[in-house]
Amino acid sequence: MKKELRSYIASLLEKDERMDGRKLDEFRKPVKVELNISKNAEGSAKVTMGKTEVIVGVKIDVGEPFPDSPDRGVLITGAELLPMSSPDFESGPPDAQTTELARIVDRGIRESNFIDTKQLCIKKGEKVWMVFIDIYSINDGGNLIDAAALGAVAALKNARFPEYDEKTGKAKYGYFTNKKLPLGKDLPLTCTVFKISSKLLVDVNNEEESVIDSRLTVTTDGKNINAIQKSSDCELSIDDVDKMIDLSFKKYKELEAVLK
Amino acid sequence: MTYTKRADNRKFDEPRKMEAKVGVIDRADGSAMFKIGDTIAVAAVYGPKELYPRFLQDSEKGKLKCTYDMLSFSVPERKRPGPNRRSVEISLVTEKALLPSLDLKNYANTVINVFIEIIQANAGTRCAGICAASLALADAGLPMRGLVSAISVGKVGDQVVVDLNKEEEDYEGGSTDIPIAILLPDEKITLLQLDGNIKKEEFLKAMEYGKKTCSEIYKVQVKALKDKYKK
C-alpha cells in the first residue's frame, strides 16, 4: 500500500505535480489564523492549513527566574498531540514526536529573541513573568510543525498581561490589562521543507507526509536563520540543505502576510 | 442568603445560549462541538477497533472508553497539562453517562474511544463534554437508543437554578452543583452527581428544571445532526 502510494506521489512530483493540484512550493489555502479562541487564555489562536487544525494558547503567570538568568522572564513551550486529532496519536505522557515539535517551536521563538525577556523581570532574582505557550493538535492533516509555530507567534502577538497584585506579588487570574508582551518587530516564522526522492516541497498533507524521505524545519526572522531541525531517516546533501533554506526564506513573506 | 437576580440576567430556569456542530474533526470517525455560554467542548470518536491488550476484551460486547481533559489555557489559572484526579473521575462518570445510550452487542472484543477536550471553561464542562460526546457517537454511526443531554442544575444562595456559570458556582452565599445527564427520548437519568447542601424538595425542583432544559438541549443536538447532512 505505502509503496504504491509512494511511487504514485513520486511520479507526480517528477512532473512537478501534487495529488491535490498544488505546486511544490505552495501552501494549502487559505492559511487561516483565528484569534481569541479561548477567553481565559492571555492570548490564543487557531491555525488552519488545509485540513490541519492546531490551537495555541498563551498563559502568563508570575514565578521565579532561573538562577543563571535572574533578570529575565521565563518561556516554556509545551505540546500535546491530542489522540482526538489522529488515529495515530495515543494518550499518555508526551512522546518523542510531541517533545520534538514543542522544542522546535520553542527554539525558533527563543533564539530569534522575539520576546524581550529582560522586560519580563519584575524583581531581579525573585520575581519574573513566565510565559507558557501550549500547543494542541485538533486535526492532524499533515505538517503540524508549521501550523504550531505559526499559531505560537499569533498567540504571543495576541496576548496581554494579566493584572499584577502588588500586595501578594501574584497574578490576578481572570483579570487582564491592555499591556502587550514585549515582542520584536521581526517575526520568527517557520517553514518546513520536505524531500521525496529528489524533489523538495512544502506543507505536506497526510499522504505525502507518510512517504517523505527527509524533512528540514527552518525558522527565520526574514533575514537570519534562527533555528534548524533536520528530521526523518534519510540523509541530505549540502546542496539539498542550501535549497531547502532558500525555499523556507522564500515562504517568509507569505506567512508574515497571514499574521498582518 | 437571598439570591434574587442572576448576574447575567437569566431567568432561574433559563440555560445559557447553546450552539452545536457535528463533524468538526476530519480524521475522527465521529466528532462534534458543543458550546453553552462561555464553555466550549469538543469531542471525537475513534472506533470500534480491536481492543488490546487482549485480556481487556469483552467477548459479549464492545467497550466504551472516555477521556476528558481541559486545555491548559481554558481556565484562568493555567492547568498543568495531562490528566489529574478530577479529569480521571469525570472521564469515568462520562463513560457511565453515555453507555446506556449505546447498543454494543455487535461489537464484541472492540473498544470505542471517546476523547473530550474543553477549549474554554466557564462551569458545566463535564455536561458540555457529554453533550458533544453523544453527538460525536451518533456522527460515528453507532447504533444508539437516543442522545444523551446533560446540564448542571443546583442552588445559588436560596434559589434553585439551572446551568450555573462560574460566578454562581463560586457564590459566597453558598451554592450546590448537580450535574445531570438524561437519555432522551427515554427520559432516563444516566449521570447524577451533587456537591453542596440542599433540601430534598429543592433537589426535586432542580431535577424538574434539569429535565426541561435537557429536552431543549436535545432539540439543539438533533438539529446539529440534521444540519450536517443538509449541505
Image: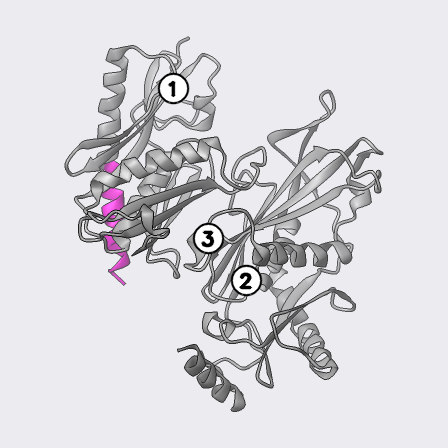
Q: Residues within 10 Å of mark 2 (few under 14, many from 20)?
A: many
What number is the disc on residue B195? Answer: 1
The disc at residue A90 is 3
Q: Position of residue A43 (x, y in %)?
A: 60, 45
Q: Amino acid at mark 3?
A: Glu
Task: Using the image as rendered, state which of residue B105 and residue B37 is in the foreground.
Answer: B105
Q: Residue at x 46, y 85 (%)?
A: A7
Instruction: Work out how far the residue at label 1 is from the one at label 3, CA to CA, in angstroms.
Output: 33 Å
Q: Give the vertical position of A106 relative to B150 (above or below).
A: below
Residue interval drawn in magenta? B216-231
Label 2 near label 3: C-beta < 8 Å?
A: no
Q: Which mark is residue A144?
A: 2
Is residue B219 in the magenta section? yes
- Inter-mark Cα distance, 1 to 2: 41 Å
Q: Total marks drawn?
A: 3
- Report the residue at 42% width, 52% height from top: A84
| Disc 1 secondary structure class | loop
Inspect the magenta stretch and tell me whether residue B85 lies in it: no
* Label 1: few (<14), some (14–19) or many (≥20) C-alpha neighbours in 10 Å: few
Task: Using the rendered image, report if marks 1 and 3 lie on a common chain.
Answer: no
Image coordinates of residue B197 in percent, x first then y, are 36, 12
